[in-house]
Image: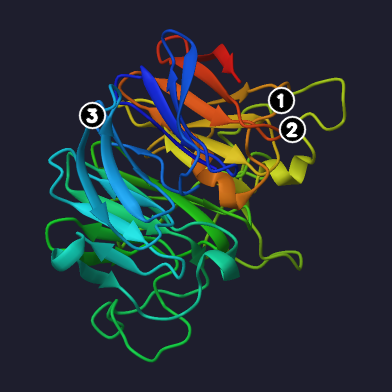
Amino acid sequence: MVLGVSSDGRYAISTHLSKHLVLWDLEQQSREILSTNANIYSAYFIHDRDAFLWQDLNDQVRVQTVDGEVFQQFAHFPTYGHVMDTSLEHYIASDEEWNLFHGHGGDMQTILSDGDVPGVVSAGKLLHISLSEERGLFTTAGYDNRERFDLEEHPPIVEGQSFGNYGGVFLWDIKTLKPIAQLPGNSVKVDAAISPDGQWVVTGDENTIGLYWNTDQPEKRHRMASYYSGIFLDNTPYEDGDSRQWDKSGLIPTPKAEKPDRWGDDELASTITVALTFINDSEEFLRFGYRSHWVALFEAGNPWPQKYFDLGDDPYPSTASYLRSLSIATAPKAQVLVTGHRHDGGITVYRYDPQARTLNKEWVGK
């Protein structure tokens, strides 16, 4: 359901629908079951540490090393996704209704609580929290159906409100724990990732829209190219009964294969984004299509796809469910990608070569 990768690309940690917590040694190509009593949404590797987060079904959160040492443990509500920074000072967790909290125990404070929906059940996905350690910024993304609004007029903590305003993509400051900017423009289920250096936010959604922002200019939105149509041009003249105008100048050929479903189950589905993740510190990222085993490589700040990779369909990667969008993770420093499997509880490990721009399968773990 969820997995994380250590910064050095040596280990992965995963939580499963079966309630298993599994530690994978990617170098030795082995695995160890650490628990059969784990919260299925609680695996998270802490940046630049040999330690990870997980929660058991007695609601105890542990900060545990790959050697088995538990050096922090605390009671908490059942988490539906959480992160912790390298200093271990900032712990942020989401509940079932996408309320956000910082800290734990008597030090816990509410960051976001402005409505009962959207949430995990109503949206059918987790609120994705993406953290940039370098800039002290993080993003949240879940379900977007709001136009841009004034953050002062719509604060993140409101009582008695049914439908919240903060389900879309937002940029936050981890020190102030306040939203810095709303990043609107996506539609329905949306995923977002912030680059390791905190310079870029990239987004993609269930409605095939891809966008990106420079965090120094969050008011300026940029469009990502569609694989077939190119870049939609805003404010273009209405011509020939069709207001849609597209720039195709930077498109590259889409993947070809003998089978008609060369993208996976459906070519259109390949343009529907289920997850995004940065693959290296040079700000290249991968965009995963829904129910597709093809993935597109992009450069942050560049709207055009750079290359397409086939992850293969044996095993099929875990791109068929938005509730499993966090079962795709990378270690940007090590250029390692790890995905879950669509039909079983295993993982597949790939390594990216930024010079050759190749993505090679290294191990299938089961």
**Of callouts 3 and 2, the N-terminal one:** 3
Along the line of sight, which residue is nearer the eye, 345 or 285?
345
Asked if labels 2 and 1 touch by Cβ distance under 8 angstroms, the answer is: yes
Residue 176: x and y, percent?
Answer: 13, 63
Looking at the image, can residue 266 be seen?
A: yes
Q: CA distance from mark 1 to mark 2?
A: 7 Å
Q: Quadrant of the N terminus?
A: top right
Q: Secondary structure at mark 1?
A: loop
Q: Residue furthest bottom?
A: 160
Along the line of sight, which residue is nearer the eye, 103 or 182?
103
Q: Which residue bears the numbered disc 1?
A: 255
Residue 84 in the figure: left or right of residue 98: left
Mark seen at residue 263: 2
Residue 103: x and y, percent?
Answer: 19, 59
Amino acid of disc 2: Trp
How busy is the neighbourhood of tag 3: few (under 14 within 10 Å), some, or many (20 plus)?
Answer: few
Amino acid of disc 3: Glu
Amino acid of disc 1: Pro
Q: Secondary structure at mark 2?
A: loop
Mark seen at residue 69: 3
Q: Is residue 169 above or below residue 211?
A: below
Q: Residue at x 40, y 10 (%)?
A: 355
**Of callouts 1 and 2, the N-terminal one:** 1
Residue 119 in the figure: left or right of residue 364: left
Residue 119 in the figure: left or right of residue 272: left
Q: Residue at x 54, y 33 (%)?
A: 305
What colouring method underlies this structural image? Answer: rainbow
Looking at the image, can residue 217 be seen?
A: no
